[in-house]
Amino acid sequence: MKLFFTILFPATMCFAQNGVGINTTNPQGVFHVDPLKNNPSSGNITLSQSKDDFIITEKGAVGIGTHLPDASSILDIQSSNKGLLVPRIALTDRLDATTITSPSKGLIIYNTTNDVTKDIREGLAVNTGAPSAPIWEYIQTKEASKYSLENIFTEQAKNSVYFSVTGTSTSNTNNLFDFSVEIPPNSIDAKLIINYNIPGGPADEVVKPSAYIGTIISKSVDGGNTYTNVTGGSKIPLKVLPSDLLNIEIINGQIIDTVSNTSNVPLIVHYKFNAYVEQFVSSSTPVYYRFNIINEQDNSWGVGAITAQLYLK
């Protein structure tokens, strides 16, 4: 005996000239499903009426939550209160080629494994390798309140800077360093941490001045046309040494600066380091000082150097 089963669908199907409609007599594509049956029987439908719809257009694009998928997309999903849930998979390591068989390059998953010993952590991952040799890279998300290291800049002194002081104090206008840092476009909140070490002292070991030596630091964000002083300069006292010893001191310090670049092009920030001498015992004859490289024949005596770390949010 043969048994026949009839399955009844609680929906209406319409075959129109312009496509197939489920629960609608007015399909807007080759295949159109209207679960809530709220589309008009003719004419155009609104975006609010198609929030529950599924459509395949004559160009092969798929729309979910819209009857007008974007022309640049193959799949356009729209919702105001729901998200996209990608497959959650536990990878074994960053080169896992067995959990997913021949994963296509560009395949995106949500990895659920955390294992620092295998360089793998939970989060969205994409295969950037070949199907036979996958490399799972993580799609980075920067927290609004945290900075991440973007770049490191370094500079080393190329020659000594000499100048004389008569009286009590002076600031050398022939700067020790003119150090520049490039801030990427649209970096609204860039933070710079600049560390410097600059040797300096009297140019003659016979002369033993009573003085402070240090740096005055300024910056320019307009190509070096104008400079403003920044916090981070320092000064130290010269030690009193025997007459046959050259008095060398290392001026070091740190600058923490925040720069905003809202333009679409890189911003070059210039930092100028000027030598500073403050003689608290005035001299009537010139006292010569030397900064950066203390001994050109032997740089181990001391070479000025600067390192800047750039952090972005």
Image (cartoon, rainbow, N blue to C red):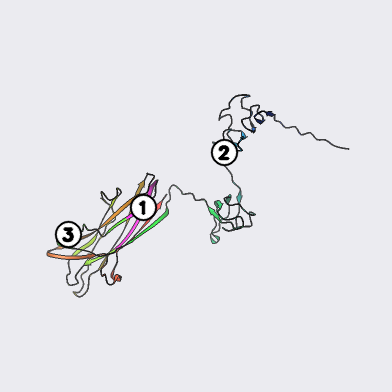
Is residue 136 left or right of 33 when viewed as pictured?
left
For label 3, the residue is 169
Viewer-side residue, 60 vs 40: 60
Dividing the picture into quadrants, the one containing residue 131 is: bottom right
Percent x, y for residue 291?
24, 64
Which is closer to the viewer, label 2 or label 3?
A: 2
Question: Magenta stretch: residue 196 in it?
Answer: yes
Is residue 80 left or right of 41 when viewed as pictured?
left
User: Who comes first in sequence, dot 2 or dot 1?
Assistant: 2
Dividing the picture into quadrants, the one containing residue 3 is: top right
Q: Please name the amino acid that badge 2 sits on.
A: Asp
Q: Main secondary structure of the magenta part?
A: strand
Which is closer to the viewer, label 3 or label 1?
A: 1
Viewer-side residue, 87 vs 151: 151
- What whole-number distance in Å separates the C-alpha atoms at marks 2 and 3? 70 Å
Is residue 51 left or right of 305 when viewed as pictured?
right
Q: Please name the amino acid that badge 3 sits on.
A: Ser
Question: Badge 3 local density, few (<14 within 10 Å), some, or many (20+)?
Answer: some
Q: Label 3's element?
A: strand
Q: Label 2's element?
A: strand
Percent x, y for residue 298?
28, 72
Q: Which residues are magenta?
A: 180-197
For label 2, the residue is 76
Q: Label 1's element?
A: strand
**Residue at (29%, 66%) from the top-left corner?**
303
Question: Magenta stretch: residue 45 in it?
Answer: no
For label 1, the residue is 182
Percent x, y for residue 311?
40, 53
- What whole-number distance in Å separates the C-alpha atoms at marks 2 and 1? 38 Å
Percent x, y for residue 300?
30, 71
Question: Badge 2 local density, few (<14 within 10 Å), some, or many (20+)?
Answer: some
